[in-house]
Image (cartoon, rainbow, N blue to C red):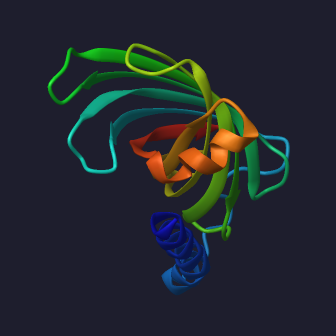
Amino acid sequence: MKTFKKISIALCASAIMIPALAQAQGMHAQGYGPKMGDREFSLSGSGSSDKNFDSGGFGLSGDMGWYLSDRTVAGVRQNVTWGSVDNGDDIWRGATKGFIDYHFGHNQVRPFVGATLGAIYGDGVKETGTAGLELGMKYYVLPSTFVQARAEYSFLFDSSNSAGDNYDNGSWDYVVGMGYNF
């Protein structure tokens, strides 16, 4: 439970600091980013590790989202990863998740926080549900084109009871990529 508290405090502190960072940028970039009703597609390279960084892998992540407001995007994400397991065979894994992210500010720099819920499948994992919290940053290099970095802490579950039990045994996923609003 100590790990849960530390992660929760770190995520809350980060969420509080992100709007201040966005304001500190001082950039007034009208015309950058999406508006309500726009769609978004992004393609990212991903990496993951267990909480001790003993095993890890790399993969590809594709997102398709719809803006519910100028700041809120909801969508579907597909991940495919290949991994190397400490003292084991290489594996592949897939995950299909729904996500919702809230973006801060209307500048070229857009920090965001969000949540995911979906399913994970493949070698080395039990086919089961997954949920997580994420935070990241988008930087608009053109009015509709951005580069992004995102980190997600996710955990597996097959019932509501196991969700609480498994939170401390989660993993970190990281992505860096590009996207486009249309």
Compared with 49, 32 (above or below) is below
**Residue 30 seen:** yes
Q: Nearer the viewer, residue 62 or 145?
A: 62
The x and y percentages for residue 94 are: 49, 19
- Residue 18 occupies which quadrant of the picture? bottom right
Horizontal placement of 35 versus 139: left or right?
right
Quarter of the picture holding the C terminus = top right
Residue located 56% across and 69% down the image: 8
Horizontal placement of 178 versus 29: left or right?
left
Residue located 39% across and 13% down the image: 123
The x and y percentages for residue 72 are: 76, 53
- Residue 102 occupies which quadrant of the picture? bottom right
- Residue 130 occupies which quadrant of the picture? top right
Compared with 174, 80 (above or below) is above
The x and y percentages for residue 43 are: 48, 31
The x and y percentages for residue 61 are: 47, 29
Residue located 71% across and 43% down the image: 161
Total of numbered circles in the picture? Answer: 0
**Residue 97 seen:** no
Horizontal placement of 80 versus 32: left or right?
left
Q: Nearer the viewer, residue 107 or 66?
A: 66
